[in-house]
Image (cartoon, helix red, strand yellow):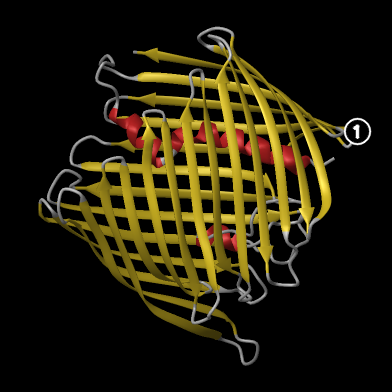
Amino acid sequence: MNAPTYWRKCMRRHTVVAALLSGVGFAALAQGQPDEPEGSRLTLTAGAEAARAGSGLYTGADLLILQQTRSQTFAFQLSGNVALVSDGDFARSIETPSASLRYRNDSGPLVFDASYAFQREAVDGLISPGELINGVSQTDFIDDDGFRTSHSASASVAIGTRDPFGANVQLSHQDISYTDTTDTDLIDRQISTAAVDLRFDVNPVLQFTPGVNYSVEDRDDIANTRVERENIRLGFISQVNKVTRVEGALSWSTVETSIDAPVGGGRAATEDESLGVDVAVTLDQRNGQTILSYNRALETTGTVDRLFYRRNMSLSAVQQLSFGAGFSRFGDSDDIGFIGSLTYAQELKNGRIRLVADQSTTVTEDDFNATTLNVSGTYSTDISARGSLSATAQYTDLRIEDPALADRTTASIALNYQHALTPEWDVGAGIRYVKTYRDDVETDNDTTLSVTLSRSISLFR
């Protein structure tokens, strides 16, 4: 039985709950609503899920506590998945717990935001850990048993958000560790980051945005590798006219990698330096926007140049279309990778449809090109005043030129029904089927049946 497939499904459910803890959603919550009474609002959301996958029986639970006033927001989220039966044997073990805590204060001249998150998840099927940290496209799927545990904390202070001069200071730390794994590339690591961003409003149409960023990553490998990254940036934003906006920046980046010297003791270090360039021109049009951008940046694997064209448009009052195409080049090589995206969304009479396709390219640490294609489609409809039905199909294909790494493909289809029993109680049921291929050979298939029950209460006081 492929339990990690169920765990990944559960983590996606937890991500939906935890989205309320994200920066975008949190900022909106902190503003409050004009028609809310004075005082605070307390929201409690709890949910439970039971699922059967292969020869296993599992259950999961979520709890969200959200308290907000016009200027402050506090949120706490707790999730857990329990294996009741695994491979035909009774288990009763908590497999993938997660927790999130966040506080935001937007009163007075300062904006303070702090958060902490804990997560434990199965590593099978996750993208490679190095790419997660560097924030670039995936280059490999992990094919191993065991779990990854991560602790992350962050804090930021912003001043002058409504003044001609503003500043934002951010600090963060992340600790990642692996248990019960055999892949030697899965290395424990700790990453700390500090950043300062400034903003100067020269006049109503010109803004300067200098900033500095520093991060250090310590890896618990045999060489005790440490990677230090520094970036100094000077940017600007200019509203050239009513329909044209130009953004640009020059930056200087350095990446220093040090390891234990193989002979003689001490440390051996290498350093890469590069000039970075960011330019984006946005043209507002009658039915949307056109954006042309160029970016040159220094990443762990070397410099990367990206040129991209994007068009966002409203086809009608209920139809939205976004598409883009471009190229990326890594280092001084002649290999150029195609990148593109396409998104279509339409509101129907009693539902909605959304189609997404995107292709990205990157390079592995061994200098092999990797291309990832993602295609997904979602259709949802309100079949009654209280019931809704949704269907989702997803296809992911990863191709790596490195002969030592296998290509990987996953395809899935899911059907879910949600019913509002009362204004506070919801019940749902779903089925999901997943197939996995390595080098175009089927290696796994899994079917998951699930039932969910949740309740949400909102109180004013």
State the residue in front, 71 or 5.
5
Asked if residue 122 shows in the view, the reply is yes
The crowding category of the residue bearing disc 1, from other C-alpha atoms within 10 Å (few below 14, some 14 to 19, many at least 20), is few
Find residue 403 and report its image quarter.
bottom right
* Residue 358 appears left or right of 309: right
- Residue 219 located left or right of residue 145: left
| Residue beneath disc 1 | 88
Figure check: 142 above or below 15: below
Which quadrant holds the N terminus?
Answer: top right
Give the x, y percent position of residue 231: 36, 70
Residue drawn at x 50%, y 9% as measured from the top left: 423
Using the image, determine if residue 304 lies above or below residue 148: below
Residue 401: name its quadrant: bottom right
> Farthest bottom residue?
264
Residue 456: % across, % down? 51, 17
- Is residue 97 visible in this depiction of the protein? no
Quadrant in which the C terminus is drawn: top left
- In the picture, measured across the screen, residue 145 lies left or right of residue 350, that is right
Q: Position of residue 393 (x, y in %)?
A: 65, 37
Residue pictured at 39% horizontal, 36% vertical: 315
Q: What kind of residue is marked 1?
A: Gly
